Amino acid sequence: MLPTQSGGPGAFANFDLSRVPSPCYVVDVQKVRSNLEVLRNLGNQSGAKVLLALKAFSMWALAEVVCEYLDGCCASGLWEARLALQKGFLRKGDSQVLSTYSPAFRSEEIEEICSLSDHLIFNHPLANGIEVARRAGVSIGLRVNPQISLGLDPKYDPCAENSRLGYPISKISEPELSRFDGLHIHTLCEQNFSPLLETWKEIEKFIGNALLQFKWINLGGGHHCTRADYDRDGLMDLVDEIAQKYDCQVYLEPGEAVALDAGILVGTVLDVMDAGKKHALLDVSATCHAPDVIEAPYRPALLGDSKRGRYEYILGGSSCLTADSFGTYHLEKTLKKAERLAFLDQAHYTMVKTNTFNGVCLPSIALWDSQTDQLSMVREFQYHEFVNRLS
Ligand SMILES: Cc1ncc(COP(=O)(O)O)c(C=O)c1O
């Protein structure tokens, strides 16, 4: 079980949960802005260009806000690349950058991906699409696997044994590297600075001077740099050192860090049942609305959860999956039917991963401004969203 990374409710401690329909994601634009501010400062002070990893957080209602602060986006393929441009996450023609990486590209999509992307990153030196990208004049990069496993869990560790993500650094030759404009690594997940430093030392050990040929070096995501305890000075020093030593542009592509603690998932207790242990049966689902709760797994922090409460409940999701549970919580008071509750830190890797398994409805999406208290509903989903994905 991984720990929750939530730093607490922040402004959501004062949010009245009955103001939104249930279930609903509520995103605080001020918290997104304050995360973006940290990232922009980090970029300005170190010289790094900071890109939003859309796979984590693609809330296009905030595309203009993201665009105000960051240097572009990174996409996982054609659809995210289209989304970035169509929804205004970046202004093409500006100095902003769209960087696209996928473990493998589809031949029929590669030309359009090239037309949208500034950087295209390939998973191995002979990957499908390299020649097309070169002819199209896109700056091409190679993702390498530094083969130093420092992840908290093998499921989220691209350096885990036999990983398919990135070309093993021990296999790469200088002539292979010389065909690329840039180098890409992505090895971290919700981590602080020291594993990045260790990883970088390993890369220098393996390919050292060959790094001098790159125009850019992309250090991927997984840097939890908006978390209170993150060593931002360490990261800025490393970025500056790499840029000076190898005369290149350094990129960072955080996802989670942009939306950390910026959203909650509001749900309602539909029923309470004693089955030996007390279950609260909710209209939210871990499987459908917060799949990482089960995939990771982790137990999300609950608004108002005291840990020392006398009343123990298993908070159960609304699908038929036995494992569709948010976990066991100890509350100060008993839960009643129709009562609202909210899970914390639910803006990233949630809206981008929802599904309608069991015909469970998709949560609405609301934007809240914790400074002005203004609330607006940006999306409400209906039955046709479920039907139209079936045939
Ligand atoms: C290639 C790449 N870049 C960036 C990210 C964003 O990582 P995070 O959201 O942990 O910062 C990911 C996440 O899986 C990734 O695979």
Image: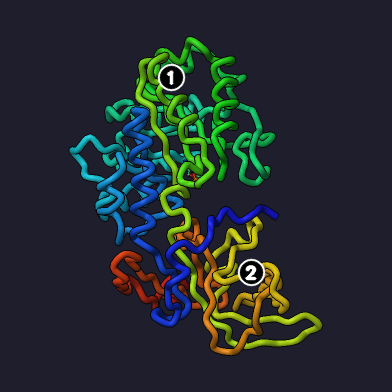
Q: As drawn, is 330 to the left or to the right of 352?
A: right
User: Circle 1 sits on which residue?
Assistant: 241
Amino acid on which disc 1 is placed: Glu
Q: Does mark 1's beta carbon lie closer than 8 Å to ligand 1?
A: no
Q: Percent position (x, y) of residue 315?
A: 65, 75
Local crowd size for mark 1, using a 10 Å CA cut-off: few (<14), some (14–19), many (≥20): some
- Place residue 182 in its image quadrant: top left
Q: Quadrant of the N terminus?
A: bottom right
- Place residue 358 in its image quadrant: bottom right
Q: CA distance from mark 2 to mark 1?
A: 44 Å
Q: Is residue 317 at all visible to an observer of this figure?
A: yes
Q: Does mark 2's beta carbon lie closer than 8 Å to ligand 1?
A: no
Element type at mark 1: helix
Query: Is residue 166 positioned above or below 254 on the image?
Result: above
Q: Is residue 127 at all visible to an observer of this figure?
A: no
- Residue drawn at x 31%, y 64% is 371
- Residue drawn at x 47%, y 17% is 177
Element type at mark 2: loop
User: Circle 2 sits on which residue?
Assistant: 306
